[in-house]
Amino acid sequence: MLPAPMLDDWLRAALQEDLGTGDVTTEILVPSSLRGRAEVSAKEPFIVAGIDVALRTFVLLSKEVSAPSKAEDGHAVEAGSVLLELEGPVRALLGGERVALNILQHLSGVATLTRKFVDAVAGTGVKILDTRKTLPGLRGLEKYAVRTGGGVNHRSSLSEGILVKENHISACGGIAQAVNAIRGKSPHTLRVEVEATTLEEVEEALAAGVDAILLDNMSIETIRESVARVHGATQLEVSGGVTLENVCKIAQTGVDAISVGRITHSAPGVDISMLLRNG
Amino acid sequence: MLPAPMLDDWLRAALQEDLGTGDVTTEILVPSSLRGRAEVSAKEPFIVAGIDVALRTFVLLSKEVSAPSKAEDGHAVEAGSVLLELEGPVRALLGGERVALNILQHLSGVATLTRKFVDAVAGTGVKILDTRKTLPGLRGLEKYAVRTGGGVNHRSSLSEGILVKENHISACGGIAQAVNAIRGKSPHTLRVEVEATTLEEVEEALAAGVDAILLDNMSIETIRESVARVHGATQLEVSGGVTLENVCKIAQTGVDAISVGRITHSAPGVDISMLLRNG
Amino acid sequence: MLPAPMLDDWLRAALQEDLGTGDVTTEILVPSSLRGRAEVSAKEPFIVAGIDVALRTFVLLSKEVSAPSKAEDGHAVEAGSVLLELEGPVRALLGGERVALNILQHLSGVATLTRKFVDAVAGTGVKILDTRKTLPGLRGLEKYAVRTGGGVNHRSSLSEGILVKENHISACGGIAQAVNAIRGKSPHTLRVEVEATTLEEVEEALAAGVDAILLDNMSIETIRESVARVHGATQLEVSGGVTLENVCKIAQTGVDAISVGRITHSAPGVDISMLLRNG
Amino acid sequence: MLPAPMLDDWLRAALQEDLGTGDVTTEILVPSSLRGRAEVSAKEPFIVAGIDVALRTFVLLSKEVSAPSKAEDGHAVEAGSVLLELEGPVRALLGGERVALNILQHLSGVATLTRKFVDAVAGTGVKILDTRKTLPGLRGLEKYAVRTGGGVNHRSSLSEGILVKENHISACGGIAQAVNAIRGKSPHTLRVEVEATTLEEVEEALAAGVDAILLDNMSIETIRESVARVHGATQLEVSGGVTLENVCKIAQTGVDAISVGRITHSAPGVDISMLLRNG
Amino acid sequence: MLPAPMLDDWLRAALQEDLGTGDVTTEILVPSSLRGRAEVSAKEPFIVAGIDVALRTFVLLSKEVSAPSKAEDGHAVEAGSVLLELEGPVRALLGGERVALNILQHLSGVATLTRKFVDAVAGTGVKILDTRKTLPGLRGLEKYAVRTGGGVNHRSSLSEGILVKENHISACGGIAQAVNAIRGKSPHTLRVEVEATTLEEVEEALAAGVDAILLDNMSIETIRESVARVHGATQLEVSGGVTLENVCKIAQTGVDAISVGRITHSAPGVDISMLLRNG
Amino acid sequence: MLPAPMLDDWLRAALQEDLGTGDVTTEILVPSSLRGRAEVSAKEPFIVAGIDVALRTFVLLSKEVSAPSKAEDGHAVEAGSVLLELEGPVRALLGGERVALNILQHLSGVATLTRKFVDAVAGTGVKILDTRKTLPGLRGLEKYAVRTGGGVNHRSSLSEGILVKENHISACGGIAQAVNAIRGKSPHTLRVEVEATTLEEVEEALAAGVDAILLDNMSIETIRESVARVHGATQLEVSGGVTLENVCKIAQTGVDAISVGRITHSAPGVDISMLLRNG
């Protein structure tokens, strides 16, 4: 997931956002000594992601919060399943509730939608990839949720992969020139991927010896023809307009990977609630 | 929106997340002196929100980026509408593209869904409210998008409103006791709202003289009966299970406001793209 | 007080300010293994505020610091009273001394002055409120000290309350127009308060149906007349030129609350010292 | 003052504290295009400190704010004097008002009280020093205000001076041993000062060849006798219980400097107000 | 280099480190209105790197600083060459001097040493790579200096490349198993490189179909034999004990790249000075 | 060293730099439950510095990491000496390895080079000082390493010492004028040091009564003559062009201290490796 110290910084900022200058209602009504138990439960079926992040939220408010039981990320739960049993000071349970649930409902939403795409291409060997179409500040966690749902990550930032797009190509005078320029200078550990929108570009990229070709917004037929021409010589990734309806058909063309923006930018939050039982 | 200095800090963090240690592809292929133009366009109809935030993203990368034209937040656009024309160093245009679009597609998504709920209750005088079910780190911007869509904000943090929930009530021994405790201590500028799930609780809250009652997960009949009993003596807000299908029926009961979690936590991103034309 | 993670960040910054690049004297003269005890004591009578913040200061420097005994916030102490007994590495005791005492002397100063105003209006039922006239960076703690002294907080930031001042009114064309504009757009949980400097404005605000009226810099007579005209229909707050000498007279007019800037911006620090006894 | 980039960071934090999630009242009532003028004026006589900091506060909210005229730090003003004329977007003027005034009233308060002590020892050649008894987060600015008032700074942090106190001495077995240990290890650029509470300690420190001796809480007679014995061989500083009443008498003993905690921790804020005139 | 907003943050921290609470000497002796010119010059021959970073340092202290002329990164300079002519407030020139020179002398040192290695393998087509043996906080800039010197970057962080080392292999039961595990899960854009210390491991890695093999601490003979066996089927990188003396011999074995830790962790600073000419 | 909370912040930033968005290789190949042992060893003889910082690096990644044994800062080790034995989760051991070793190799490099200079002047009583020629972000740790190697720190920042250089002198019209201006205003705890490049300047500084004179880039003869003229009346420091070859000769002139830039800016990293043994 996120390296531990960075996760804590992120969670502290999230808590600060929700607490503002303090939870006035609770501070007036709930004595600091009151301890209680709480249950975080699913109200619909989904794939869980983010349990440890949610738990950590409460712990950052009080080290006395513990979790007698918790669900496991990547597992499917039913409506009514208990995701997290908590025990500790009631002020910390109430103070962390909204942030923890906001995280859990979103990450589980991403994992659940990812799983649907993964299941839709089951048996084809095709990987479901995410994109950089993520919500600002949430990329690391969303990419974790994608992995939890069975997807594979595309690059996490512009420094974690070479992707030569149309804009770059036109600035260099052609795919061959661009790939050539890249080759002498790009970091040793990064693959070189080139975007192609036509069969000609696929051929050019192939000739330039790239590590992967991104088939962007192509018709199924063109994708199929690309697969035929490339014939395993390089990785093929499809992107653009992928839905649960058409993903299987795309997968059956024989490409290696399909990237789907909506698993991060449009995954609906799952329904989760927390019930508190005082001391 | 966000106060300017805070917005810049937030955008810098978003850029850092996307740039990682730098945009290797672009730095190799695009000379720093190359200038160009870009157009950000809608690929479906929606309500725009976040234009200035998107523009600021590019400017933080280079003060030489300017916007010859831009759409206005709150306006409805069609597929094909140009949202933002940009001019400046190509490196800055490419470097800011993904972050700017991620923001714009999400905020416009929130504004668009909010507008649908607002339209659904048009004529009833009922306010559509947001909740604290927002994505961590995005609350301020999402709440701005809600306003842009015609909604009204509920509290932005636990310090910006008193809301006495069941958990608080049980910790105090009753609504009357809770409200009493609050009254002597709560900040001068905050209303006191109490959650009620039954008519008895509505009566209790009314007797305690609260500023607003939150009718949580009640049936339409109970809501209607609550309206009758309260008879304008205090504000009434409905929450829980509100959808585009049932929101109008709820509004027609005569309550003052309806809060809807999904306008922030489950608004699908709208479809936007950026096309670059080098100098 | 401040939510725990934010308090720690704030204290770390305070320690960094005082330690600079390190406590050179102590690092040369005191071995890191040396343990000792220290007593923080009052040198004059006052109301204590900030004990836990002071203690936390030392703990952030070394988790081995403990406090065998400590005074309670809100209590009155005499000259000579021990506020905090400490035990731990001498380097941590000396390294945290100045920051801890600076906090304690200021917060106790605020609580003590607040208590004097609260005592001065005892029996009238009037609340003593603070203002936003606080020292930059210290607002959350100063507002805590005000509560500790028996005061009630006004808004903690511009987002935690609506207060329509003269400047706003003139920009809108009148109190009625301003209140009207506010009503459709202001956050659901915030009261609407309007500043009035004349009886006419009090009447206008009353007619507009505001939640509270701030009587600014009025004479006792005008305040009294305002109370008579409002007759309990809305909250009345007085501000401007309030001193320990005149606060009781103001309270006796029958207003609900009196806000006092000097309890935060001009409270003299109380006299506190720390005595160390090595191992 | 503070180095420019650090000052901006500090001011941004102060603005964030005051703005919270935004100035709701102003955003609803004041159009973003409205421009206006404002005057910040003194309501009592004092020594000005912090004008540029106050001005910078507004500029951080909008680069369009300018100051047609401003008072100069260190000058004495009368009730009614205009400290700062401002021009710019009304939202920025209102949004920065409280923070700017809070800074100005506090720093001017510190400068004014410092000047009183400086004036009280006029003609004696004695320096008035500040201490580390400052408000957390405000040290750099408070020390600037002290200089503005005519005082001289003592160390700004524990790394900016060697001061061997009783606690250190007892940990080392005596002044001679402490000074010896210091001498081989302390940074090249720092003076070595030792605290003394008796004449014997003064003699010991003198013999050890220190750069300065801090006469702590001594009677006037003992101070006078210390001056006689030291006879100019090292700097002498007095601290403890210094007031406007006794500071001149202390100065007349012939010491070099007198440090006064209250000029920073207990300086009352001066009275300042801002009046706005819309465009 | 570093994305602009991150570079500014880094420089501000560097300035804060050097300025502490302020440049006392200069603030006392140099009036804020005094303007001057300064020349930053080389005192020995080297390859320049970091000119824009150095210049930015001064600009962050005062926007009035400009550079009438400056050297270009990557160029060789002689003793006496002027690297940077500066003009602006003397306080800013003196305040930024040390930080700017510290950066320039280190980055130029890295570029200069890199260039020596690059020159030593000239004609072989072998790339000189850096490593993660960089100074904490300086990686991005040091990697820029490596590129400036003609080197190519290895991964900039653990998320920017897959490198399976002995420790990983032993945890998985063999190279084949490790590569297999990686293949289904590693980010789409990253190459898979495996460390090998024997010919057997080279064969295993080759069979597993990796993108690159890191020949770690092998003798020239074993490297040569590895080249023969791999025969262009995958990239070969050498690391361990590489010096200016042996690098050419290694390059002549026919490997693709050689990584050298000392170009970042042990590059001596070059000799640079700044001369100021007031007004 | 660095005050504990600041050190942790610094280490977290260093870890973030090296981990990027996460250690992908290790997260895929090493199960989070796997525990192991590791040994950090010297591969050449050197003076150790930074052991506790290195250990803390691992602990920040996992509180379960412990160190059964560790070397002591300031001690000389041989090739093969174990510096640190570690035990804990393998992910934390691998995740912290590079950062910890980068710190240790640099700080030990600084301490080792410092010790060589200290040894070269052994018996002369002369102090070896560092300078502000440090790597940005590393000053506090490098200055600690200098002390560990037996050196003494010069000022750590511009606020921790007065040093009047040529630029300052020319701005004031002479040494006497500069020292005079300083004397009335400089912080009480700071020595006043003046740079001199000729005997005339030495005389001027002496006459002005400074605490120390920095003999900058003087010949041995001029240094010797300066010592003769000053005759113990003030501290004498030499700087400029100091090497291991000439430092002893300089020391024998009788000056008090010699400052050496290269011990921080050009100390080669020492050779250290970490070997891991799973379970």
Image: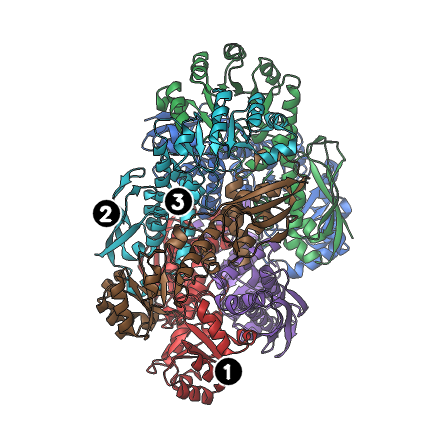
Chain colours: A brown, B cyan, C green, D blue, E red, F purple
Residue B267 circle label: 3
Instruction: Determine which residue is flagged by label 2.
Output: B80
Q: Residue furthest front?
A: B221
The three-letter amino acid code for the residue at tag 1 is Thr
Q: Is residue C210 left or right of residue B277?
A: right
Which subunit holds the residue at mark 3?
B
Instruction: Determine which residue is flagged by label 1.
Output: E197
Which subunit holds the residue at mark 1?
E
Q: Nearer the viewer's eye, disc 3 or disc 2?
A: 3
Q: Position of residue D256 (x, y in %)?
A: 63, 42
Q: Position of residue A84 (x, y in %)?
A: 59, 50
Residue A27 circle label: none
Q: Position of residue E73 (x, y in %)?
A: 34, 66
The one nearer the camera, C88 or A117, is: A117
In the rendered structure, are the residues bearing label 1 and label 3 in contact, judged by CB atoms less than 8 Å apart?
no
* Whether labels 1 and 3 share one chain: no
The three-letter amino acid code for the residue at tag 2 is Gly
- Residue D191 visible (yes or no): no
The three-letter amino acid code for the residue at tag 3 is Ala
